[in-house]
Image: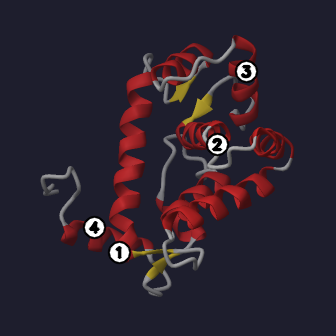
Amino acid sequence: MAYNNGGMPDQQFLWDVFQRVDKDRSGHISADELQVALSNGTWSAFNPETIRLMIGMFDRESTGTVSFQDFGALWKYVTDWQNCFRSFDRDGSGNIDKTELKTALTSFGYRLSDQLIEVLLRKFDRFGHGTILFDDFIQCCIVLYWSLNSTSSAPEVRVALDIAEFVYPDSALRFINTTTSHQRH
């Protein structure tokens, strides 16, 4: 695979991958198509919430899908997260435990209490093993970022987003998607 100077695969490679993922040949990748194409390293399906978050971030046409024009950025985003995840998965287990999560979030500049790290671990540990898989790690970091860096200056909106994410995940995703689409225009 050939890479250009920006660390992106060349356009032909991306086009070939895009065509393999775009099963219905619509010219856009749906959430279902993306979920099938991505691997979290455990042979289990990629988290649908993470898929929706990523599509919301890269869907510049507001269609609920990703076009080829946006696919390269999505590819780089997932690859960058994969490299990040691997760097914090110190034991090579394919998942992030509490200590690794705390190390990762601290390196991102978050100073969170052990109690909050525990809450995040419980929230994003889909299988109850005390660890977070790659796709859930992406979701955890995105939600944490948006919760703490909401474009609203009103603290009650940030608190509402935190509560919405932990109690009603779909409402928080809608807020995040709305926020990101407003930022793009």
Please give the residue where the numbered disc 3 appears in the rendered image.
116
* Pointers 3 and 4 in contact (C-beta within 8 Å): no
**Front tag of 4 and 1:** 1
Helix, strand or loop for disc 1: helix
Please give the residue where the numbered disc 1 appears in the rendered image: 69
Image vertical order of residue 130 relative to residue 182, above or below: above
Q: Residue at x 59, y 20 (%)?
A: 97
The location of residue 6, given as percent across then percent down, is: 19, 52
Q: Camera-side residue: 172 or 43?
A: 172
Name the residue beneath numbered marker 4: 14
Work out whether residue 2 or residue 36 is closer to the camera in this orientation and state it.
Answer: 2
Snapshot quadrant of residue 111: top right
- Residue placed farthest to the front in the image? 153
Q: Nearer the viewer, residue 116 or 182?
A: 182
Q: Quadrant of residue 141?
A: top right
On the image, the x and y values in percent for residue 158 come to 74, 41
- Which amino acid type corresponds to the residue marked 1 in the rendered image? Gln
Residue 146: x and y in percent read 62, 44
